[in-house]
Image: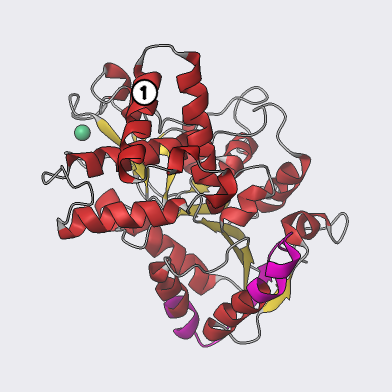
Amino acid sequence: MTRTTYFLGAGASKAFGYPITSEILPKIVQRGKKVLARGTSGPVSASKKELKELLEKLFPALWRQPERDMPLITDLLTLLNNAIVTDTPVFIDDSEMSSHQRLRLRLEQGIVDALRPPYRRNSPPKLLRKFVDSLYPSDPGRTNESTVVSTNYDLSIEGLLYEATGSGASGSVDSHEVAARIDHGFTYRIPFASHSPLATRPLDSKVGLYKLHGSLNLLRCAVCKCSFLNPLGDVSWRPFLYPRSKLNRCDYCGITPLKPVIVAPSFVRDVSELGLSEVWNAAYEALRAAHRWVFVGYSLPPEDYAIRSLLLRAYRFRTTKPEVKVIQRKNTEEDKEDKEKQHLMQRYRLLFENPKFHFDGFEAFIKSPPGSKPGN
Ligand SMILES: [Zn+2]
């Protein structure tokens, strides 16, 4: 049995229509403008109004800039996080830092909005289905062959993976079946059920799915530290729109509002406070045990120093090295392509011996060779 760990970056979700990092801020501004143009009232409009006011206060030109000239969301969040961590305001009239916290919150809300599925739930892209089918073995005796380590928060993979657990009528998902067959790398509570039962990690899971930066179907209680994973879909919007309502209440301790679990892209970030360290340990073990590592749409960006450390440790501390494949899409801007390609190859070669590069994208990787499991 060949064990494969897929390591998915934003480029993997791009293949299914989700935005990559450089497209997120333009999408946030675009949606903000759209909501404000409606002129309605309510929590969504109020949040977009606050986003616009705070962004314009910090960068007066940004809201009106052409999309191609907008900075990366990573730059904005790094600026804010650094200001918060060092207690050095960048909003000159806010020595108490509340504008910084609120703008960060609104940008995180924008990220959550931008990662809504770009397709209808009942008609996911065929290639996505093909990839997920290859991850989930139909033979009951086959377990633990594939794991997915992902830096993405979107639910593209799990939407179909949860369905594949085969619970109930077509398309319906049973939380207990999901908990028994999919290893998420940590213990969580099942929400919206009486007493929120605890789902511990299954010993013989069909697939491991470890999301290093959190997930849109995950909420966490800051007081009792319980994590709630909802296999029925996205719940990350609740804390932004209804921070203190019953729609966003910890089922376990009963009173506390829940928080989303997303580690937004920034050079300054900390995964420990979101209870993700168990997931990182599970990802480390999966990488240690796999014969093959397949990186998809992941550019090893500088801000992911914790991930490079994880990969380096998992790679160096094993006697038999895994085969390393890197699947990347070509840059459509020709002048940038060669330079980016060279930099990407340098970053991978610094960490691994003889990685194999494929620059024809995830779609081609899933398709070929026809009729067989991706990567064979
Ligand atoms: Zn609680």
Q: Residue furthest top?
A: 40
Where does the N terminus fall, quadrant-wise?
A: bottom right
Q: Which residue matches tag 1?
A: 193
Return the residue found at the far front.
Answer: 61
Q: Residue at x 45, y 70 (%)?
A: 302
Q: How is the image coloured?
A: secondary structure
- Spot occupied by residue 193 in the image (x, y as percentages of width and height): 36, 23
Determine whether 5 is above or below 198 in the image.
below
The quarter of the rendered structure image containing the C terminus is bottom right
- Which quadrant of the figure shows ligand 1? top left
How far across and how far down the image is residue 315, in percent? 50, 80
* Residue at 58% over, 78% down: 348
- Seen from this angle, which residue lies furthest left? 96
Give the extent of the magenta segment. 313-340
Q: Is residue 321 magenta?
A: yes
Residue 136 in view = no
The x and y percentages for residue 85 are 19, 57
Residue appearing at x 65%, y 80% in the figure: 355
In the image, 107 versus 255, the foreground residue is 107
Question: In which quadrant of the rendered view does residue 194 lie?
Answer: top left
